[in-house]
Image: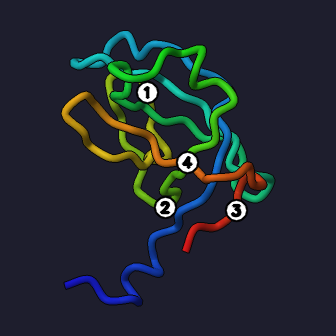
């Protein structure tokens, strides 16, 4: 079981998607996404398999919840620095986002 101390180690923040492209070398359809996670953390890149439910245009400007303290991993040609959180559904991944617009970099707890 996960303790509250373990949970507190996960750094979740709000960020805004500022650029989206196709991750052309990914095995499964995915986007290469740039996210502004606020002044302290900066602009981070992620690769996300969310092409079933979201167009690139609809993602631009969308606020998302990301985990910032995972080790970066290479997905095809993309160095994924943060992980976008979402819910798995039968139709695809639904992105988690704040109910109201908040400042980029706001901590999730």
Residue that label 2 marks: 69
**Observer-nearest of 101 and 109:** 101
> Which is more N-terminal, label 2 or label 1?
2
Q: How far apart are marks 4 and 1 (CA)?
A: 23 Å
Q: Distance between the residues labelled 4 and 3?
A: 12 Å
**Residue at 42% of width from left, 58% of height from top?**
70
> Which is more N-terminal, label 1 or label 3?
1
Marks 4 and 3: which is nearer the front? 4
Can you name the residue that lies furthest to the front here?
A: 99
**Residue at 60% of width from left, 53% of height from top?**
98
Q: Distance between the residues labelled 1 and 2?
A: 17 Å
Asked whether disc 4 touches disc 2, contact meaning CB atoms under 8 Å apart, the reply is no
Residue that label 1 marks: 78
For the C terminus, the quadrant is bottom right
Marks 2 and 3: which is nearer the front? 3
**Residue at 36% of width from left, 35% of height from top?**
74
In the rendered image, the vertical position of residue 98 relative to residue 20, given as above or below:
below
Q: Distance between the residues labelled 4 and 2?
A: 18 Å
Residue that label 3 marks: 106
> Residue 24 appears at what percent x and percent y?
37, 10
> Which is more N-terminal, label 3 or label 2?
2
> Residue 65 appears at what percent x and percent y?
54, 51
Residue that label 4 marks: 97
- Crowdedness near tag 1: few (<14), some (14–19) or many (≥20) residues, C-alpha within 10 Å: some
Q: Residue 40 carries which label?
A: none
Q: Which SS class for mark 2?
A: loop
> Which is more N-terminal, label 3 or label 4?
4
> Which is more N-terminal, label 1 or label 4?
1
For the N terminus, the quadrant is bottom left
Q: How far apart are marks 3 and 1 (CA)?
A: 25 Å
């Amino acid at each position: 079981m996960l303790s509250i101390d373990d949970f507190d180690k996960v750094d979740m923040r709000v960020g805004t998607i500022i650029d989206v492209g196709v991750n052309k070398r990914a095995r499964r359809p995915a986007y290469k996404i740039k996210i502004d996670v606020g002044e302290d953390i900066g602009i981070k890149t992620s690769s996300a398999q969310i092409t079933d439910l979201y167009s690139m245009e609809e993602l631009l400007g969308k606020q998302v919840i990301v985990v910032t303290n995972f080790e970066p991993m290479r997905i095809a040609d993309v160095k994924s620095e943060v992980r976008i959180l979402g819910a798995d559904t039968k139709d695809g991944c639904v992105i988690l986002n704040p109910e109201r617009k908040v400042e980029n970099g706001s901590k999730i707890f």
